[in-house]
Image (cartoon, coloured by chain):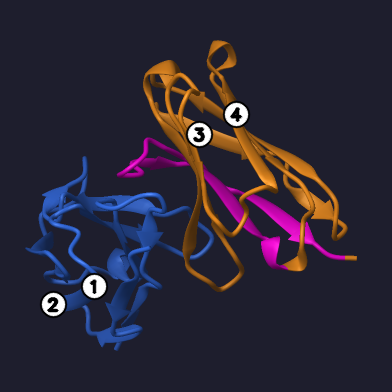
Chain colours: A orange, B blue
Amino acid sequence: QVQLVESGGGLVKPGGSLRLSCAASGFTFSDHYMSWIRQAPGKGLEWLSYISSSGSSIFYADSMKGRITISRDNSKNSLFLQMNSLRAEDTAVYYCAKDRDVFDIWGQGTTVTVSS
Amino acid sequence: EIVMTQSPATLSVSPGERATLSCRASQSVSTNLAWYQQKPGQAPRLLIYGTSTRATGIPARFSGSGSGTEFTLTINSLQSEDFALYYCQQYNNWPPWTFGHGTKVEIK
């Protein structure tokens, strides 16, 4: 079945970095846009980044622009999010989601905690 | 950036009754609006897109309506599994794609 599985979250100190991964299965990954969305504890959903199917088009939310880099490896059906200069307010569950406008499939999320 | 405002923040409904959730956009999003359901500890699940088209596997008791800046999600005959958080999201003007802050549907 169609599935997204995130990994790479954890506890990191302020100013640190993490690289999140999202493994896709059950659909032709290379045909689809992909996105990252996060949810801070007890808060709503915040779109972070989008990448086109080929990787040629990328957008970032202003809240993290300059600190995150989205990428994909279509040969490995994988999506990535490199996060640098992390702050306490970046503590959240990070989801990868299939497609762009309508997020029809979500992963289970990976938790990032930024704390000293 | 289009701001999505959902009301009420919390809706108390008895099982079997109807729930009506509202979502307002700060400017027109045409019918490019989606609704998601989220249960505690779970990822969001797509319910409706294009304002009124149910996603695969979504029961007919969920319906959406509206256009422009005013939208409604109606859940008829609430079942126990429907008590959850609901988010609206616009995809008319992007980036960014923006979500409302959510409406919690709780048991009355």
Query: Is A111 colored magenta in this rendering?
Result: yes
**How far apart are the alpha carbons under marks 4 and 2?**
43 Å
Mark 1 element type: strand
Tell me the residue at 54%/60% (across/down). Answer: B41
Q: Are marks 3 and 2 on the same chain?
A: no
**Residue B91 drawn at (x, y percent):** 28, 51
Q: Which mark is residue B18?
A: 2
* Label 4 sits on residue: A71
Of circles 3 and 2, the one toward us is 3
Of circles 1 and 3, the one toward us is 1
Give left or right: position of A47 versus B104: right
Task: Give B19 or B73, whichever is nearer the viewer.
Answer: B73
Mark 4 element type: strand
* Label 1 sits on residue: B23
Of label 3 and label 4, which has the lower sequence position?
3
Tell me the residue at 31%/76% (across/down). Answer: B5
Contact between labelled residues 1 and 2, with CB atoms less than 8 Å apart: no
Task: Give B9 or A87, whichever is nearer the viewer.
Answer: A87
Please identify the residue farthest to the top as the structure is shown: A75
Q: Which residues are magenta?
A: A89-115
Give left or right: position of B107 versus A84: left
* Label 3 sits on residue: A4
Quarter holding the C terminus of chain A is bottom right
The answer to whether residue B62 is above or below residue B104 is: above
Answer whether residue A114 is visible to the viewer in this image: yes
Give left or right: position of B23 versus A81: left
Indicate the amino acid at tag 2.
Arg
Q: Chain of mark 2?
A: B
Give left or right: position of B50 versus A46: left
**How far apart are the alpha carbons under marks 2 and 1?**
17 Å
Indicate the amino acid at tag 4.
Ser
Mark 2 element type: loop
